[in-house]
Amino acid sequence: MGFIIDAIFQLIFTAVIASDLEAGLSAMEQKDYATASAKFHSAAQQGNARAQSNLGVLYFEGQGVLQDYTRAHMWFNIAAIAGDKDSVTNRDLAASKMTAQQIEQAQRMARECMSSNYAKCD
C-alpha cells in the first residue's frame, strides 16, 4: 500500500513541476518575465534542471528580475551539475563577465542551494 501511495505522490509532484515549467515557458514566450521568473523559481527549487537553466537566463538578461551575473552563474552551475549541457556554456559566458570573487561567491551560493535541497537559493 505504501508503494502505491508513494507512486501516486511522485506522479502528482512531477506533474506540478512540469506545470510550473510549462507555465514559465509560456510566460517567457509572451514576454511576461515576472511570471516566468516565479514559475521557474518554483520548478527550479524542486530540482528541475531546465527551469534552473531558464532562471539563469532571466538573471543573465535582467528579465523579470534584476540583472545579476552571480545568480545567473549559480543557477547555470546547478543546472549544469544536473546534466543540462547548455548551462555549461551559459555558465562560462556569465563567468566571463564576473570577477574571481563573484565567481567564488556564485559557487558558494550553488553549494548552499544544493546542500539545502533548494531551500536556501535566494
Image (tube, rainbow, N blue to C red):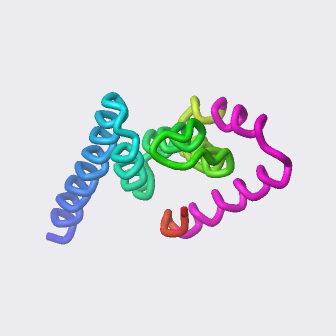
* Residue depicted at x 37% and y 52%: 38
Q: Which quarter of the rendering shows the C terminus? A: bottom right
On screen, 99 above or below 22? below
On screen, 111 above or below 72? below
To which quarter of the image does residue 79 belong?
top right
| Residue 73 falls within the magenta-colored stretch | no
* Residue depicted at x 48% and y 68%: 119
Image side of residue 120 versus residue 29, left or right: right
* Residue depicted at x 14% and y 70%: 1
| Principal secondary structure, stretch drawn in magenta | helix
Image location (x, y in percent) of residue 37: 41, 47
Span highlighted in magenta in the image: 89-116
* Residue depicted at x 21% and y 62%: 9
Q: Nearer the viewer, residue 11 or 50?
A: 50
Image location (x, y in percent) of residue 104: 79, 55
Image side of residue 101 versus residue 112, left or right: right
Q: Nearer the viewer, residue 122 or 111?
A: 122
Q: Nearer the viewer, residue 40 or 7?
A: 40
Image location (x, y in percent) of residue 83: 55, 39
| Residue 107 falls within the magenta-colored stretch | yes
On screen, 82 above or below 42? above
- The mark total stands at 0
Q: Nearer the viewer, residue 115 or 2?
A: 115
Image location (x, y in percent) of residue 120: 54, 68
Image side of residue 58 versus residue 9, left or right: right
Image side of residue 33 versus residue 94, left or right: left
